[in-house]
Amino acid sequence: MLFQGIASNPMMTKNTPGSTVNAIAGENGDMVVSQLHGKYYNANAAGKLYYASNAAAGAAFTIFSNTSFVGLALFNPAGSGKKLEIVRASMGMAANAATAASAWGYCWQTGVGASLVGTAAPISGSTAITATRGSGICGVAGQGDSVVTALSAVTLSAALAWGRNANFGTGTGAITTAWGVMLYEDLEGTIIVPPGTLFALTSAILSGVTGVGSLIWAELPS
C-alpha cells in the first residue's frame, strides 16, 4: 500500500471538523504528526500505570551494598506474568544531610522468589509501603491490580548489585540547605524489571540523606 503525504506548513492551515484532509509531510519528506495525549496516557487509562513513594517524612537511604537496605524498592515476584517498564524516578530531600549527600542510581537482584512471606531467598525481612502507592488513576483503591509489592526496607542475604547511575546526583559533601527542586529522570522504559526481580532506587555512597523517593512504572505481559 502506497502512503503519501503532501509537503505543507501545518501552522498556516486550519481545517473544519468533518472535512477530509491530506496527511502532512515536512520539507524533508518526514511525516508530521501530533501527540493527542501524554506519552503515558494510554498505559494509565488502561489501568496499568502505578506509582510508589516513601512517606512524606522521608527515609534514611542506605548505601546500595548494605544488606539491611532502606530506601525505595519494587518486588516483582516470580510467576507474576508481568514485566515492569520503569518510566520515571524522582528524589526529594526531606532533611538536611550533615554527613554526606549522595550519588543516586538503580540496583537490582534476580532470583528473589515468588513471595515475600517467610524466607523467600534472598529476602528474609521487609517493610511494605501501602499508604503512598497506587494506580495512576485517582480514586482507584489500594494498589489496583498491580502485582508489585513496594518496599521501604529490605533485609537481604546478599547485597544488591549496582546497576547504573541515575542522571541526577547531589554530590558527596554535607548539605546544610535543603534542595529547592525535585530531582527526577524520565527513564521511558530504558529499564525493564522481569518477574523474580527486586529493583531499587538507591545511593552509591554511604549517605546521610533523608529523602522521599518515587518510582512510576507500567506493568506489561512478560
Image (cartoon, rainbow, N blue to C red):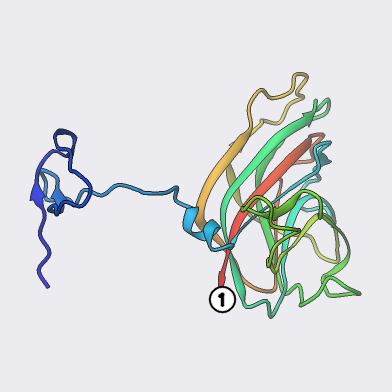
On the picture, is 69 further left or further right than 212?
A: right
Label 1: element kind: loop
Please give left or right for residue 10 compared with residue 76 in the image.
left
Question: Closer to the camera, 16 or 130?
Answer: 16
Res. 127 visible in picture: yes
Foreground residue among 188 and 209:
188
Residue found at x 62% / y 52%: 216
The answer to whether residue 101 is seen in the rendering is no
Location of residue 136 in the rendering, given as x and y in whole percent from the top left corner: 62, 53
From this view, report whether residue 135 is shown above or below residue 11: below
Q: Position of residue 86 (x, y in %)?
A: 58, 56
Q: Is residue 176 above or below residue 163?
A: above
Mark 1 crowdedness (10 Å alpha carbons): few <14, some 14-19, many ≥20: few
Residue 1 on image: x %, y %: 12, 73
Residue placed under numbered mark 1 in the picture: 222
Is 64 on the left-hand or right-hand side of 170?
right
Q: Residue at x 79, y 34 (%)?
A: 209
The amino acid type of the residue labelled 1 equals Ser
Q: Residue at x 69, y 73 (%)?
A: 196
Q: Quadrant of residue 200?
A: bottom right
Identity of the residue furthest to the top in this view: 177
| Res. 167 image quadrant | top right
**Residue that appears at 89% across and 74% down:** 119
- Which of the 4 quarters of the picture holds residue 126? bottom right
In the image, residue 67 above or below residue 222: above
From the image, which quarter does the C terminus lie in? Answer: bottom right
* Labels in figure, total: 1
Above-or-below relation of 148 to 94: below
Residue 84 coordinates in the image, percent (x, y): 60, 64
